[in-house]
Amino acid sequence: MYKAYKFRLYPTTEQQTQLAKAFGCVRWYWNYSLNLCQETYKATGKGLTRGVIQGLLPNLKKEHEWLTDAYSQCLQVVALNLSTAYKNFFEKRAGLPSFKSKHGKQSISFPQNVKIVGDSIKFPKYGEIYCKIHRPITGTIKTVTISKNPDDKYFVSILCEDGLEALATDSEGKAIGIDVGLTHFAITSDGSKYDNPRHFAKHQKNLKKKQQKLSRKKKGSNTRTKARKLVAKVHSKISRCREDFLHKLSRKIVNDNQVIIVEDLNVKGMVKNHKLAKAISDVSWGKFGTMLKYKAEKEGKIYLEIDRWFPSSKTCSNCLYKVAEMPLDVRHWECPSCKTHHDRDVNAAINIREEGLRILSLGTSDTANGGNVSRSGKTSVLSDVVPIEIGSPRTLRAATPT
Ligand SMILES: [Zn+2]
């Protein structure tokens, strides 16, 4: 199983200069190849394969001698990453790859030959760089990435293979449904609501102030560069706070539960709505789902995403009556059929949990064909459900949906 570690890295001034050159080479090669991919795509409707991109290297190195400032395998990783980015785009998992800017986050990846030496990490070509390794690294080191944030902090991410099989999943134990929202970050089927940490707002305000300052600086001036660094620093602070919050919350949920069910949010689709865009990208639900998933899988627990078209907000979790409309600003409602009073989000979380358990008990997420499946005496929420029950949660270890 793969496991990732991230540590702060402290290169010397000399190493920083070397790394800056390497970042530049990698960025240039990415942008050059991306441009070529775009031209090819325009002309033929196809992308370039990894082999073709990599094949450009020998000539490029002859033309631009400075390209050898980067460790050659770091450049080869670029070819792999770019072809993967295009593959993800063609298979609709991601947007088009974009050009890299020297003002953004910089990184280089080493596919092999990196070693841990005491308090340092030894890289080919760049030597030993001091690193705060605050937890033991287990397994074989695979890819190692050095990154530099726009606020000039360096980090290293180490991907390891620990040689262990992922534990067999077991759906016995507590199951929880999670709904995500704007008023609260996450709402669970047991009625807990988790807020975004309060200090987010403070950082947000600070960010706005620093951005306004930046916008008043003259282009190309020294004070503008300084102001840009300050903005980057706040951005970095916000993202580290958010990451910390997401890690702690996902850890708590995974520790307390055996089955975790969330609604598969098409975050990309929702971001297109500009009013909600900022709030949604702020709360980073996608990242939260990823964290829940790998933490759960690591412990042999079940993580399940259910269809985002499932009407979790509009359905009464008590009698399954479905209301026609549920505007976003309605926080509480009463079921017209059974008169139960609902908290909008908790009701949705309960429905997500029930729907997830129903799918798990059927051993499939396939909801084709007609038929009716009962759920402790109730009819299913979905009108089109699987006709035959093919097992109980206990017999379902192999069929964990992803
Ligand atoms: Zn009802």
Image: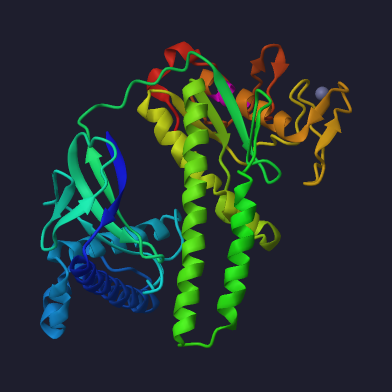
Residue pictured at 60% horizontal, 43% vertical: 197
Colour pattern: rainbow
Is residue 260 toward the left or the right of residue 299 in the image?
Answer: right
Looking at the image, is 320 positioned above or below residue 45? above
The answer to which of 57 and 52 lies nearer the viewer is: 57
Q: Where is residue 125 in the image (x, y as percent from the top left)?
A: 10, 63
The answer to which of 302 and 5 lies nearer the viewer is: 5
The answer to which of 83 and 387 lies nearer the viewer is: 83
Q: Position of residue 104 (x, y in %)?
A: 41, 69
Q: Position of residue 317 (x, y in %)?
A: 74, 24
Is residue 268 toward the left or the right of residue 190 in the image?
Answer: left
Residue 375 at least partly seen: yes
User: Taken as a whole, is the magenta stretch helix, strand or loop?
Assistant: helix
- Locate the C terminus and report the quarter of the image it occupies: top left
Q: Position of residue 380 (x, y in %)?
A: 68, 23
Looking at the image, is 51 positioned above or below residue 42? above
Residue pictured at 83% horizontal, 35% vertical: 332
Q: In which quarter of the image is residue 205?
A: bottom right
| Ligand 1 visible in quadrant | top right
Residue 33 belongs to magenta span: no
Residue 356 belongs to magenta span: yes
Looking at the image, is 247 positioned above or below residue 378? below
Q: In which quarter of the image is residue 264?
A: top right
Is residue 316 toward the left or the right of residue 385 in the image?
Answer: right
- Locate the N terminus and report the quarter of the image it occupies: top left
Q: Give the range drawn in magenta.
A: 355-359
Looking at the image, is 148 positioned above or below residue 264? below
Residue pictured at 66% horizontal, 16% vertical: 374
